[in-house]
Image (cartoon, grey):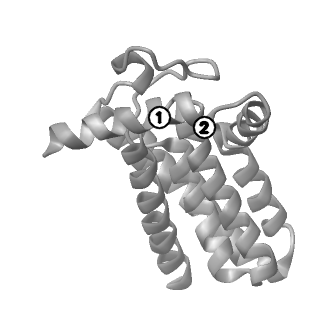
Amino acid sequence: MIEKLLSLDGAILLFIQEHVRNPVLNPIVIWITKLGDNGLIWILLSIILLSFKRTRKIGIISVCGLVGSFWINNQFLKNLFERVRPYDANNGLVPLIDRPGGFSFPSGHTASSFAAAYVMFQRLPKKWGMPILILALLIGLSRLYVGVHYPTDVLFGMISGILISYMAGRMVDSV
């Protein structure tokens, strides 16, 4: 079962490379994926939220989610699972960006995006929360498009980011 899932993971990436990538989308998706580099967009949004009394608690939860995601996903789970990047495991897969270091599972870009965006989606007015959540989804999907993560890396990054966001919210709400 695991073998079939891993095979499907690689096949999806090769399908994207062969049938979805194109010269018009490539620079747009590369720009989107770079928005998630080092969680910078989420850190900036969190700082903005921290700057206003009305949204300060949302900013605090977002920061807690980002810190939690970094420790749980990037420091613990990546080193626990040690999944190699898809371009190292699948002949013919060519990444569109510089090859990131470290392991593949889970997607840190996706996890941090959802750790911050989900709390914003839940607690900000929908006119702000929905576009922020869509940006998180686009960053996650961009990781597949550029060939640096498997679909299961991104899926688990989404799930873990949402769970960490939820836990951060519960923690801050209880104080």
At a point 42% along the width and 59% down the height, the residue shown is 160
Mark 1 element type = helix
Q: Does residue 2 appear to the left or right of 23 in the view shown?
A: left
Report crowding for label 2: few under 14, some 14 to 19, many 20 or more residues within 10 A (C-alpha).
few
- Residue to which mark 2 is pinned: 20
Q: Of callouts 1 and 2, which one flags the residue occurring earlier in the amino acid sequence? A: 1
Measuring from the top left, give residue 57's x and y in whole percent. 69, 77
Which of the 4 image quarters holds residue 126? bottom right
Residue closer to the observer: 33 or 14: 14
Q: Position of residue 169 (x, y in %)?
A: 53, 76
At mark 2, the secondary structure is helix
* Kind of residue indicated by mark 2: Val
Separation of marks 1 and 2 at Cα, in angstroms? 7 Å
Residue 74 lies, in percent from the top left, at 44, 40
Residue 163 vertical position relative to residue 101 in the rendered view, above or below: below
- Name the residue at 36% across, 20% down: 90
Q: Nearer the viewer, residue 132 or 62?
A: 132
Viewer can see residue 158 = yes
Residue 66, given in percent of the width and then of the height, sits at 58, 55
Does residue 57 sit above or below 38 in this rendering?
below
Q: Nearer the viewer, residue 82 or 97?
A: 97
Residue at horizontal 56 percent and vertical 60 percent from the top: 114
Q: Are circles 1 and 2 on residues that touch, CB within 8 Å?
A: yes
Tell me the crowding category of disc 1: few under 14, some 14 to 19, or many 20 or more residues within 10 angstroms, Cα based: few
Residue found at x 26% / y 34%: 7
> What's the residue type where badge 1 is placed?
Phe
Residue 15 disc label: 1
Q: Is residue 80 visible?
A: no
